[in-house]
Image (spheres, helix red, strand yellow):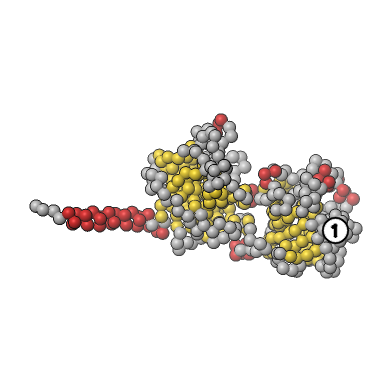
Amino acid sequence: MRINRNFIKIFFSVALTAGMQANINAQSKGGWTNLFDGKTLNGWKRVAGTAPYKVEDGAIVGTTITGTPNTFLITEKEYGDFILELDAMLDSEVSNSGVQTRSHFDVSANNGKGRVYGRQVEFDPSPRAWSGGIYDEGRRLWQYPVDLNPAAKNAFKVGQYNRIRIECIGNEMKTWINDIPVAYLVDTIDQSGFIGLQVHSINTPEQVDKKVYFKNIRIQTANLKPKPFPKGVYVVNNTINSLNAYEKQNGYKLLFDGKSTNGWIGAYKKSFPEKGWKVENNYLNVLPSSGQESTNGGDIVTKDQYTAFDLSFEFKLTPGANSGVKYFVTLQENNSGSAIGLEYQVLDDERHPDAKLGRDGNRTLASLYDLKTAAKQPRFLRPIGEWNKGRVVVYPDNRVEHYLNGLKVLEYTRGSQEFRDLVAQSKYKIWPNFGEAQKGHILIQDHGDAVSYRNIKLKELK
């Protein structure tokens, strides 16, 4: 029997095409596409370091080795808006890993070895427990430390697979670990980029030969339906003087709109100062004078008063500058100089002499001025001339927290014996019941130095 060779070619071509289409259909079932076939590393490439990746039992396994920077297995394709889900496991509490999103590779960095940069969802089994937080690898560092959402700190489990969900839709990025919502970031950079799996560099012998596992990696890129976050999760919003719908629904309000001084007046005044302050380039600027306290425009305060609240603000210092954000300001003292209140210190610690006064550094940046020292870490400080993020949370039970760039740096309780003992050793001891008013204004201090503020938002707590 003679067989037509052209018929055979056509038959196998049709069969191959049908098989490929069936595979695509299987991968795209429900709108999801598999990024890992469970058998090979097709569609991925290793960059930046030399740590090995291989496929074992349906998982991508990365292993730590000495003598290499962070190593990444990245997708050959780039993605814009997407929902990504995967399972990830670390085999040790001394390990660290993460998933890059909308990231990039600078081939010329690190003497030609290259550097990955972009937003990473962190896997962090250390005692600080920041898994699910958002770190800007190779660039801006931490954007969403999980100190901002402490209820999610125990979501990640070492030694077992964790289900990870990452949404990058428009300017919004949200993360979940094992169905627990962790981080919510609004950012304006990186509209697309690759996805990457990290093997972190190591520093100690105990970190050698530790493994990180990834499997069931799938992505949606069309007809995306965001998963709702529950109420009360803090949002880091990097857009200038703006709130997203979630923040508004959760009760946040802008105290500065970027255009006017509405809602503010001069301390001990009936209107906003005629000099010493300027709204420009979306910033609220304290203008420089002689560096003296409240001798130019003077302090400004909110027209409204607050009892319990979550206050956030960004500030940019010039070299040697001094300012502060005060709360529970009653304006009842009628004192000269800056109005009296609890103060989140805003200061150039290296250049301003006030940093060396007080006790044990309690007049340094982010401290409760003259009362309690902020436990800062140098790597969380942004240089003078760049924006830093401050936050003060006052709970209805009088517990208070200070944050700097997302890291909680101190806490205390107004009216407690510990608090009163601190007041008794401070410059405030002459004021009866200092810091214990039921309500008060928010104040921004004019200390005669050039300082800028923006993204001032507040939520009243019940």
The percent position of residue 436, horizontal first and vertical second, equals: 81, 54
| SS state under label 1 | loop
Q: Quadrant of residue 258?
A: bottom right
Camera sees residue 419:
no
**Mark 1: few/some/many CA within 10 Å (<14, 14-19, 20+):** some
| Residue at point 58%, 58% (across, down) | 189
- Of 266 and 441, the residue lying toward us: 266
The percent position of residue 2, horizontal first and vertical second, equals: 10, 53
Q: Which image quadrant: the C terminus? A: bottom right
- Of 236 and 311, the residue lying toward us: 236
Q: Amino acid at mark 1?
A: Ser
Q: Quadrant of residue 299?
A: bottom right
Q: Is residue 458 left or right of residue 224?
A: right
Query: Label 1 belongs to which residue?
Result: 289
| Residue at point 89%, 60% (across, down) | 334
**Can you name the residue that lies furthest to the left here?**
1
Vertical position of residue 154 compared to residue 202: above or below: below
| Residue at point 64%, 63% (across, down) | 243
Vertical position of residue 226 compared to residue 146: above or below: below
Camera sees residue 65:
yes
Vertical position of residue 289 compared to residue 424: above or below: below
Q: Is residue 442 left or right of residue 22?
A: right
The percent position of residue 287, horizontal first and vertical second, equals: 81, 60
The percent position of residue 277, horizontal first and vertical second, equals: 80, 63
| Residue at point 80%, 52% (across, down) | 322
Say how many tags the image has. 1
